Image: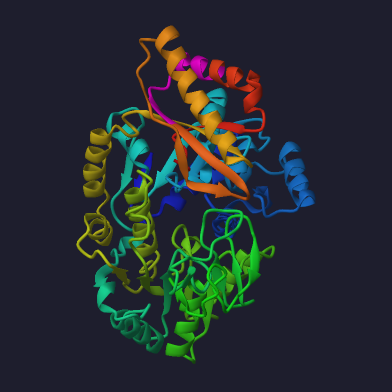
Amino acid sequence: MLYGVTGSGKSQVYLKLAEQVRAQGKGVIILVPEISLTPQTVRLFRSRFGQRVAVLHSGLTMAERADEYRRIQQGLADVVVGTRSAVFAPLEKIGLIVIDEEQEGAYASQQSPRYHARDIARARCHRHQALLLLASATPSVETFYQAQRGRIRLYTLTHRYLGNQLPKVQIVDSTQSYGFDISQELTAELLDNLKAGQQSILLLNRRGYHTAVRCNNCQEVVKCPNCSVALTYHSANHRLMCHYCGYSRDLDQDCPNCGSKLISYTGSGTQRIEDELHRLFPQAKILRMDLDTTMSRMSHETKFGEFAQGKYQIMVGTQMVAKGLNFPDVTLVGVLGADQSIFSQDFRGCERAFSLLTQVVGRCGRGRLPGRALIQTAVPQHPVILQAARQDYDSFYADEIKSRKLGLYPPFCTLCQVGFSGEQEEKVCAAAMWFAKHFGQRAKKDYPDLPLRLMNPCEMALARIAGKYRYGVMIKCRMSERFSRLMWEMLRAFDSEKNNRSVHIWVDMNGNDL
């Protein structure tokens, strides 16, 4: 485990280790959590290893991916950079696998086949007797716990590369902004940065213009007909869109439920912030980075390259601008809606909030000039906000590990979620009830000594996606060969029950969809 503050030079460690491994005639795999981080990492490694670097991610065409696989198989490339699927790169001899930003949920596949890149990497490293390096400025609580117990060797980088100071952080109470998305404090700082010819980054982890459309008469929110989520208004095409299934419709001026014309828009996304920035700073060049602006091939590389060249003064975006990026001229970071995930149902909500805030604050002050950051939040005294402002992972971890132990969450247990989905809600619910009943009976009869807690079946947080209803059964357990055997027996029993044939079942261990 390589734990280093943002800007501490972790990438330089990867390069040095890669050089040593290649000198031994072995290959290297470097994993990054998102496609947006791939171009910068590729440039870094190609500056050292040239065309010996191959790239693998889902943004490549089938022909491009086949070409990269062929180069690796023929021994023309022995350094592979990519997202989670790159862990399967066909290297014959592996000496090193690096998982950068190891805490990111993107390393876990949410579709069949379900896998976590870290688990595959661990298995391949064991087979090849290779080094597995997990790296982050904000390690996952589970990984850091194992490091603290000595099960993983821990190395720390406590200072920034070349002696740069960590950014100074100001917390702004967003409840005092009187309806403005960008506070007066942040507006003033942005203006100062523009006058000084320096660059700024704004983070808002919501895309679209408005996040919901509500009727003031009946109070109904316009929802997706296929998913249990509100439709998001996009100003570029004046349509309401679902970010889960892709459904879209024209913007009605009347409420579809009661016909009232008293329609209001709530919540702000990156499109609205972009418009607000254009209004505040009409002369500024502004770049928006979110899924809507980066759908074309090579868009990440092109846009980030233009920002690095100074063609834009302000970049606003979702989480793709928050981590792993190095822009020396960025001296200001602003965070809007910093408390989005703190109060989520997910037990990892505080961890994700702390990681995102710490990472995005770390994007500034990486060059010759010092950095500063403003965090806008409705809960300015929340411990997670204060700890992120101080870049104080140790304090956050100490509080979080106590909470996890009290609630019996990972790393003190394994969370096994058995998910069920189908087009008929009553059958999905019945299937979940059937599984919970028979699982409990079999565990009590054949595995009475197995430590586990079986929760009652319930709707998942997103109860319906793409027309499929979703229920889940949560099991707190200790992962073992005997528990795996019990689960396989139950899956076979479920599959043999004819009433369950219209329901899809999956199992996720400590997944990100809990």
* Vertical side of 60 occupied by 92: above or below: above
Seen in the image, is 11 located left or right of residue 298?
A: left
Picture quarter with the C terminus? top left
- Residue at the farthest right position: 63
Find the magenta span and give its range.
474-488
Is 95 included in the stretch rendered in magenta?
no
Seen in the image, is 119 located left or right of residue 248?
A: left
In this rendered view, identify the residue nearer to me: 180 or 376. Answer: 180
- Residue at the farthest bottom position: 283
Q: In terms of image quadrants, where is residue 323?
A: bottom left
Q: Residue at x 47, y 66 (%)?
A: 220
Q: Can you give x and y, in whole percent of width and height, for residue 219 in the image?
A: 43, 68
Q: Can you give x and y, in whole percent of width and height, for residue 113 in the image?
A: 63, 34
Is 483 included in the stretch rendered in magenta?
yes
What colouring method underlies this structural image?
Answer: rainbow
Q: Residue at x 42, y 45 (%)?
A: 103
Asked if residue 130 can be seen in this view, the reply is no
Q: Residue at x 32, y 82 (%)?
A: 189
